[in-house]
Image (cartoon, rainbow, N blue to C red):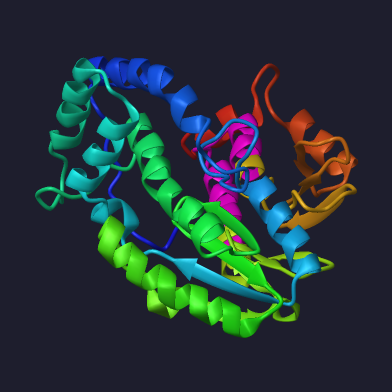
Amino acid sequence: MDPKPRTITCADFRDRVVHHALCSVISPYLESRFIDDSFACRIGKGSHRAVVQAQNFSRRFSYVWKADIRAFYDSVDHAVLLHMLCRRFREKRLHQLFRIVLEHPFPGQVAGKGLPIGNLTSQWFANFYLDRLDHFLKEDLKAPAVVRYMDDFAIWSNSKEELFEIWSEAHLWLSEELKLELKESACRVQPVSQGLIYLGMQIFPRTIRVQGKRLRRTRRLIALREKQFASGELTEAELAQCVGAAVNFKFFSFPRSFCVFRGDFRFGKRSGGGVWLESRQPRWVVEQQREELPVGESQQEHARQPQQ
């Protein structure tokens, strides 16, 4: 249900084994360099914690600059990335393996650029590539507060002029050092009171809301899954799993249990974690429907039978 088309690649099984072996070796050394406020593809981090940290900074500062990098995965420069990796790791055999991984072609690739979305190595390489940006913002530009989730990042300050200056410096540095461009249409300096739209959420100092278009897509997805369940394409367990994956992120910020009615079902978040799903119809109606089915036949099996 993501409106942005993406090309997802899947390496051969033997290549994935090599990718995991390589990442198990290099990840501790890369992880030790990452700043605390980098949240993508890291154990103990993730989008939920990035949103919470963004709200913490919105409570401390008056203004925020939200930025995004244009076509980031397709724009990663192989020569720049290889130079960074070879400076970090001295072993010649690793250098050779880095070159093999980076030079492996994938659909839609421009020569000398791009990382295939879907490979474990791409996640670590991409995070390492933008780690230089993190240190430039915090150490050289002295940005008061930074949160980055892969190529989506935000910077907070009590001075709007400071954020515009950081914007200008970061734009020039990204172009010269990493061969990247900011997506100007997605960059904006605003008061935190207006609500920062970040990672599908609208973040205010005192509350977090689901972004409107994300909520509408989630509703359409749930409606589609209900139709598939009614036609027998999904079992009740599969429906619960699909709905759980769709709504768990949307309700993560609610501290108490939360319930939503949708179609013939209601679903929500438990106070202790997890998502529950049950029929919206009264229990006696459900029991009556079950009694009308032949003995030993489930509702899904009955739905799959051709009509007489």
Image quadrant of residue 205? bottom right
Q: Is residue 100 left or right of residue 235?
A: left
Image quadrant of residue 272? top right
- Give the residue displayed 26% in from the left and 51% down from the top: 76
Q: Which residues are magenta?
A: 219-243
**Is residue 140 at all visible to an observer of this figure?**
yes
Residue 278: % across, % down:
78, 41
Is residue 181 placed above or below 147 in the rendered structure?
Answer: below
- Give the residue displayed 63% in from the left and 39% down from the top: 45
For the residue pair 129 and 104, the one nearer the viewer reads as 129
Q: Is residue 120 magenta?
A: no
For the residue pair 248 and 43, the one nearer the viewer reads as 43
Residue placed furthest toward the front: 140
Q: Is residue 257 left or right of residue 23?
A: right
Q: Main secondary structure of the magenta part?
A: helix
Residue placed furthest toward the bottom: 161
- Give the residue displayed 44% in from the left and 66% down from the top: 68
Is residue 139 placed above or below 228 in the rendered structure?
Answer: below
**Is residue 187 at all visible to an observer of this figure?**
no
For the residue pair 274 and 19, the one nearer the viewer reads as 19
For the residue pair 208 and 283, the one nearer the viewer reads as 208
Residue 96: % across, % down:
16, 23
Residue 190: % across, % down:
63, 82
- Give the residue displayed 56% in from the left and 36% down from the top: 303
Q: How many marks?
A: 0
Q: Is residue 95 left or right of residue 283?
A: left
Q: Is residue 234 magenta?
A: yes
